Image (cartoon, rainbow, N blue to C red):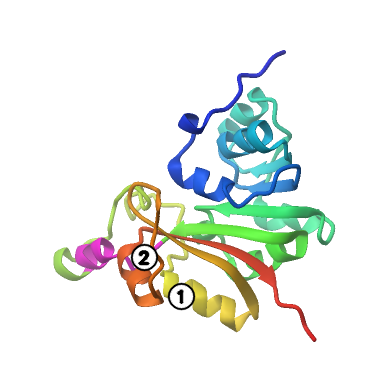
Amino acid sequence: MNKKKSRASDIRVDLLEIARYIEPLSTVLDVGCGDGSLLRYLVDEKQVDGRGIELSSEGVNKSIAKGLSVIQGNAEKDITYYPDQSFDYVILSQTLQAMKHPDQMLEQLLRVGKRAIVSFPNFGHWRVRYELGIRGTMPVNKTLDYPWYSTPNIHFCTIRDFVDLCQKMDVHIEKNMAINAKGYQMPFANLIFANLMATQGMYVLTKKIKI
């Protein structure tokens, strides 16, 4: 059965930003891959050897329909079964805040992958601060799109929080990206600016080499 080739217009702009940092012909594990849009694009455009883990049966079915190798499972549990350094890249897009133990998940990403690419909604964005500080309500927007009573997100963080966690865990930040409301990269002038103006943080991470 011939699968329709994925185009850049078929996936979210922020996922295209992630794809920019994936080398052709590499091995990729997409953790929380959703409907497989990013993975399909990477297979088509960069000829990667891609795998995925997804919690929802709907996402798994859509991924399999795209011809992808995706399993249904709990990412925090199932990633522990993968061997060390078994992928060139492990992607965790917009899912870190839904993990019970984000720090342990970060450890696993860097154990399984030579590089980890992590993106998350920035709770430090000025609109979020406005909603909390002025209106006194939990924010709902494109990146935080659930009301407080039904959200799967349990560990909100800011860009500064994430950088602090990486420093605490001795994780090397190879690239840092601030993403605006339209999904595009914006200048990462400094941490204060990114923490205030970016709707998402996106990071390419590696383990620090111990000398």
Q: Quadrant of residue 115?
A: bottom right
* Image position, residue 68 (x, y; %): 70, 31
Residue closer to the observer: 48 or 169? 48
The correct choice, above or below, for 59 with respect to 169 in the image is above
Classified by dominant secondary structure, the portion drawn in magenta counts as: helix
Name the residue: 63% across, 52% down. 91
**Precedes in sequence: disc 1 or disc 2:** 2
Q: Are marks 1 and 2 in contact (CB under 8 Å)?
A: yes
Q: Amino acid at mark 2?
A: Phe
**In the rendered picture of this protein, how many numbered marks are placed on residues?**
2
Few, some or many residues within 10 Å of mark 2 (<14, 14–19, 20+): many
Placement of the C terminus among the 4 image quadrants: bottom right
Name the residue: 73% across, 34% down. 69
Residue closer to the observer: 42 or 66? 42
What SS does tag 2 mark?
loop
Q: Amino acid at mark 1?
A: Asp
Q: Which residue is mark 1?
A: 161
The correct choice, above or below, for 56 with respect to 162 in the image is above
Instruction: Judge whether residue 123 is colored magenta.
Output: yes
Residue closer to the observer: 203 or 62? 203
Q: Which mark is residue 110?
A: none
Residue closer to the observer: 45 or 109? 45
Q: Which residue is mark 2?
A: 123
Residue lying at the far left in this picture: please name it: 134
* Image position, residue 49 (x, y; %): 76, 40
Per the model, the C-alpha gap separating discs 1 and 2 is 9 Å
Instruction: Judge whether residue 69 is colored magenta.
Output: no
* Image position, residue 90 (x, y; %): 68, 54
What SS does tag 1 mark?
helix
The correct choice, above or below, for 141 with respect to 5 in the image is below
User: Which contiguous range is marked in magenta?
Assistant: 122-132
